[in-house]
């Protein structure tokens, strides 16, 4: 399939493809599929056969599981440029362990899983590239476990506030690209607790909350709260 230059650039920058030779990359792209998802549209369901791995091109994709009582637990929010489902393939899985749904209109590229797996088996460089990606994610997951098990809800929310702001060090604004209840679920915080903590931080003039963004008014104090907790 033919993709526009923006899509090809994002694909080429993905850790999934950096170690590929041009011929390998082109072979995968030729058989790839483009998914245009409306808000709330499912890409796949938990338990569906793992036929493709994905790279998000535009919008946000929510990965989630349902608890036995029907509650939704957000596992991850996939931003543009990020890949997902490849870890399952790398571990020999044959089914998606989560649901994937578009939080907002999204564009996703699906890469043939069998074809990609064959390239992994035939190229040491590609395997090492994948191992590096998995190692980074494992480190991130270990940090997540620490946050969820060792620290309270306020700590988790303040960490998220500090990490979610734009990369420019002079910028202290967070764009709320996804609903607050989704962020709350991602942080394992009940929505009402999430709102209560935001209100308390705002009352202490540490942040200000608007419909589409949060401004960090006192970054130094927020960072001190983290240091005290640690």
Image: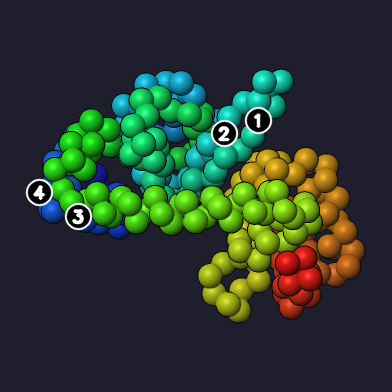
Q: Residue at x 57, y 40 (%)?
A: 75
Please say if 126 is above or below 105. below
* SS class, disc 2: strand
Whether residue 103 can be seen here:
no
- In the rendered image, the quadrant that contains the N terminus is top left
Q: CA distance from mark 4 to mark 3?
A: 14 Å
**Picture coordinates of residue 204, whole percent (x, y):** 88, 68
Please say if 189 is above or below 115. below
| Nearer to us in this view, 212 or 130 | 130
Mark nearest the camera among 3 and 1 is 3
**Picture coordinates of residue 19, whole percent (x, y):** 21, 56
Q: Residues within 10 Å of mark 1 (few under 14, many from 20)?
A: some
Q: Residue at x 61, y 74 (%)?
A: 171
Return the residue at label 3: 125
Q: CA distance from mark 3 to mark 1?
A: 38 Å
Q: Quadrant of residue 3?
A: top left
> Are discs 2 and 1 less than 8 Å apart at CB?
yes
> Are discs 2 and 4 less than 8 Å apart at CB?
no
**Picture coordinates of residue 59, whole percent (x, y):** 48, 45
How many labels were placed on the picture? 4
> Are discs 4 and 1 less than 8 Å apart at CB?
no
Q: Residues within 10 Å of mark 2 (few under 14, many from 20)?
A: many
Q: CA distance from mark 4 to mark 1?
A: 41 Å
| Nearer to us in this view, 22 or 69 | 69
Q: Residue at x 27, y 33 (%)?
A: 113
For residue 23, the mark is: 4
Return the residue at label 2: 64
Q: Earlier in the sequence, mark 4 or mark 3?
A: 4
Q: Is residue 206 left or right of residue 143?
A: right
Q: Earlier in the sequence, mark 2 or mark 1?
A: 2
């Amino acid at each position: 399939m033919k993709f526009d230059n923006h899509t090809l650039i994002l694909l080429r920058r993905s850790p999934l493809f950096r170690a590929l030779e041009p011929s390998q990359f082109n072979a995968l792209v030729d058989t790839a599929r483009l998914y245009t998802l409306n808000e709330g549209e499912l890409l796949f369901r938990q338990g569906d056969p793992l036929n493709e791995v994905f790279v998000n091109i535009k919008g946000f994709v929510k990965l989630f599981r349902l608890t036995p009582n029907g509650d939704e637990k957000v596992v991850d929010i996939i931003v543009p440029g990020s890949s997902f489902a490849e870890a399952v393939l790398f571990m020999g899985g044959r089914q998606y362990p989560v649901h994937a749904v578009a939080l907002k209109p999204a564009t996703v590229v699906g890469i043939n899983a069998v074809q990609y797996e064959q390239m992994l088996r035939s190229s040491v460089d590609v395997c090492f590239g994948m191992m590096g990606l998995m190692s980074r994610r494992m480190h991130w997951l270990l940090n997540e476990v620490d946050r969820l098990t060792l620290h309270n809800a306020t700590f988790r929310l303040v960490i998220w506030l500090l990490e979610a702001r734009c990369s420019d060090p002079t910028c202290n604004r967070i764009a709320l690209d996804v609903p607050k209840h989704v962020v709350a679920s991602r942080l394992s915080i009940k929505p009402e607790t999430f709102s209560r903590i935001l209100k308390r931080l705002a009352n202490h003039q540490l942040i200000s909350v608007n419909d589409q963004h949060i401004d960090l008014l006192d970054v130094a104090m927020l960072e001190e709260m983290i240091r005290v907790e640690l």
